[in-house]
Amino acid sequence: MYLCDTHSHTKISPDSGAELLDTAHAAIAAGLAEFCVTDHHDLLDYAGIPAGPFDWASAKEQYRAAKAQLGGRLTLRLGIELGSAPYDPQTAREVLAQGGEEMDFVLGSLHNWIGMEGNRDLYFSSFHRNTALARKVMESTLDHTWTLVTKCADCYDSLAHIVYPLRYIRRDGVELSIADYEDRVRAIFTEMARTGRAMEVNTWHGADLGSWPLLLSWFKECGGELVTVGADAHRPEDVAKGVPQAMEMLKAAGFDCVTTYERRKPVLHKL
Ligand SMILES: [Zn+2]
Ligand SMILES: [Zn+2]
């Protein structure tokens, strides 16, 4: 089985202190063949303030140094997790252009409210006993995801953690199911399949394995072929957590391959 983890953070991200070389060694220890670092660049920061430029210079310096140290022991890729592209597609495109030839992979994320609730990261909203707010964030995130896949398909390769709002809705004890939004998710998946984009199975360092079998079956039925897998680790010890289980889920859903990216081109690997 081809084990790969294409969602991981280091000290270049505001919410991680990890060194890339340490996470890459953890990837080797976990038996991964391929590993992609995808540090955050959210066009809106935690507090909803438009962010400055991404520090590509530091990201590339760290990547090149790790790659030189590792030699052939691991296929190491350079990616980015670009948040809120629909908020400012022009800036999103500028950030990606600065990545240049060396950039392998773009995860498209929506971590923030956009146009409401102060544009803050959903992490800071309280959904406690507030089903109305939980429904509002699901609708809002699906609206912006629709914009991403229809208007900004060049701003991402794989759609990261479509269930992101549910992380915090559930954290706060509100029960909502993605199944309540099946028609909208299927429309998004159909557009992703049409435009040759991937969906991500995000294991959230092994804490969310339950969301994916249903979503994978919908994606498959909508014509989707490309699936990436990531543990979304922010610490070396979380690299690859849940990845072997995710590969089994892909197989069970009828996928033959897992996808990684090289210079923004999908590469399919037999499971
Ligand atoms: Zn994310
Ligand atoms: Zn992430």
Image (spheres, helix red, strand yellow):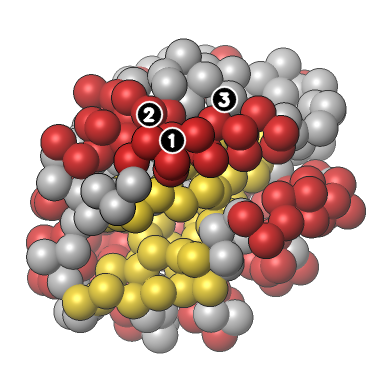
Q: Which-is-in-front pick, marks 1 and 3?
A: 1
User: Residue 107 placed where, x, y %?
Assistant: 54, 52
* Residue found 53% across the figure and 40% down from its top: 64
User: Residue 146 placed where, x, y %?
Assistant: 65, 62
* Residue found 23% across the figure and 31% down from its top: 26
Q: Is residue 57 above or below residue 109?
A: above
Say which of 134 and 141 sits in front.
141
Q: Is residue 185 visible?
A: no
Q: Is residue 106 above or below residue 198?
A: above
Quadrant for the C terminus in the image: bottom left
Quarter residue 252 falls in: bottom left
Quarter residue 251 falls in: bottom left
| Callout 1–callout 2 Cβ contact below 8 Å | yes
Quadrant for the N terminus in the image: bottom left
The CA span between labels 2 and 3 is: 15 Å
Residue labelled with disc 3: 13
Residue 66 is tagged as 1
Say which of 223 and 214 sits in front.
223
* Residue found 64% across the figure and 44% down from its top: 82
Residue 206 is tagged as none
Q: Of callouts 1 and 3, which one flags the residue occurring earlier in the amino acid sequence?
A: 3
